[in-house]
Amino acid sequence: MTRQMNTMKNETLIEIAQKYGTPSYVFDTKALQERMQKISEIVGEKVKLCYSIKANPFLIPAMLEAVPHLEVCSPGELAICERLQVPMKAVVYSGVNKEPSDVLQAVRDGVGICTAESLRHVRLLQAAAKGAGKKVPVLLRLNSGAQFGMSKEDLLTVIRNRRRYPDLVLEGIHYFAGTQRKNKDLHQQKEELRMLKELFCEIRETEGFSLRKLEYGPGLPVPLFEGADFSDTLAPVRELAPALKEAAQWADLTVEAGRFFATECGYYITKVVDSKTVEEKKYCIVDGGINHVNYLGQIMGMKQPVIRHFRGNGDPDADPESVKYCVISDTEPELQCESSKTGGKAVASGTAVSAKERAGKPAAVQAESEEEKTDWAICGSLCTTNDDLVRSRRMEEPLPGDLLVFENIGAYSVTEGIYLFLSRKMPRIVLYNDISDIRLARDFMDTSRMNTIQGKQNEMS
């Protein structure tokens, strides 16, 4: 498997783990912005980019420096933007289940544009716009086969009856068909753009009405698991770029994404707290679990995420800042570490021995590490047999105090985890922009209070 080259350095991850503890998410905002810059260059200046904040709302400040638009899909996400003082003109307010108060709040905030998921949403938007005395820009969301958006017939009905909605400015169409869509030469996405072009033309010719904007979510795939090719994770956008540039000739095009933009910038650091063998099955228990880690397509731990293994001193209760970690396995080019299952020689934090140095040693020495590897199940701290992070991974024995770092976790895990199960603490969240700019974005959070009856009823008699 070929790795992407801009992964976070081992010593940086170790430093963060020692300072902030585990379990923790780390989001590399500098790498994120560099990725967004490359995507912008690939698609060209006429194609705008929109970040779906549901993928990871902690990346909003960094993304505001990289893209002109943010997609917001719920009243809660809108409240996040309000608290962060996001310029409301940057907001695309989308999502199902919009109640009158939700729509009115968005209109009063002055969001840049609202999407309408149904005929009811159109009526709600008109009522809110009239009540606020504003003209509200609207995208009509076209259904793509799921519960989102309206049928083509309903969409045309709105346009034909547009005089009923005098306070709405019907700007264009919103279309999103799914995520992680892998298909040969991205023919599905290219066909969708052709279909949308035909629809724009049909509306202009048959209804005498011209739409200007297209908000399009191509659902481009990113690699997540061992065995995938990480050598050029921007290849999908390179493949689709000509079709996007062509679409930008007939519409004011915005490309919307979350997973494709944010996945690579995230890491999840968890500590080994126990290891044991039961009837020849080896188990490694970590202080995190499936309540924090959620890879799309991972089923009961059957697939293997990219994981780095750092050897501690065998004491999970030791002061983290005093531990000198040894690199057992990593994803940095040509970096490995010589270590026995008992810790080998203690190596300073982040120190490793290059593959070239090892290559000059006897074959028996080179093979020593491989011989020590056995199959381990990596399990979390939840009281359920479903808490399999990895069902079977061949690795050197994970000792209490070791660190495991899960890569490619910048999108969704931070918000999709089953955080309230077992009332375990929620992880810390650390934002990394450079070695001189590391800060805590959210501390550990006690979830037990959320699972407790509120008020006087919780007092035992």
Image (tube, rainbow, N blue to C red):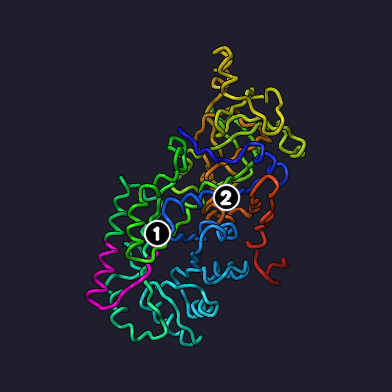
Name the image quarter holding the C terminus. bottom right
Q: Which mark is residue 217?
A: 1
Q: Which mark is residue 209?
A: none
Q: For numbered disc 2, what is the local secondary structure?
A: loop
Residue range corresponding to the magenta coloring: 195-216
The amino acid pointed to by label 1 is: Gly
Disc 2 crowd, CA 10 A, few/some/many (<14, 14-19, 20+): many
Name the image quarter holding the N terminus. top left
Rendering quarter of residue 114: bottom left
Q: Is 198 included in the stretch rendered in magenta?
A: yes
Q: Contact, CB < 8 Å: mark 1 with mark 2?
A: no
* Mark in front: 1 vs 2: 1
The amino acid pointed to by label 2 is: His
Above/below status of 295 relative to 333: below
Position of residue 37 in the picture relative to residue 317 (left or right): left
Residue lying at 35% horizontally and 51% vertically, measured from the top left: 240
Residue lying at 45% horizontally and 49% vertically, measured from the top left: 296
Residue closer to the observer: 322 or 335: 335
Q: Can you see residue 81?
A: yes
Q: Which mark is residue 292?
A: 2
Residue closer to the observer: 260 or 288: 260
Q: Does label 1 or label 2 sit earlier along the sequence?
A: 1
Number of numbered markers:
2
Disc 1 crowd, CA 10 A, few/some/many (<14, 14-19, 20+): many
**x, y percent for residue 303:** 46, 39
Q: Is 174 included in the stretch rendered in magenta?
A: no
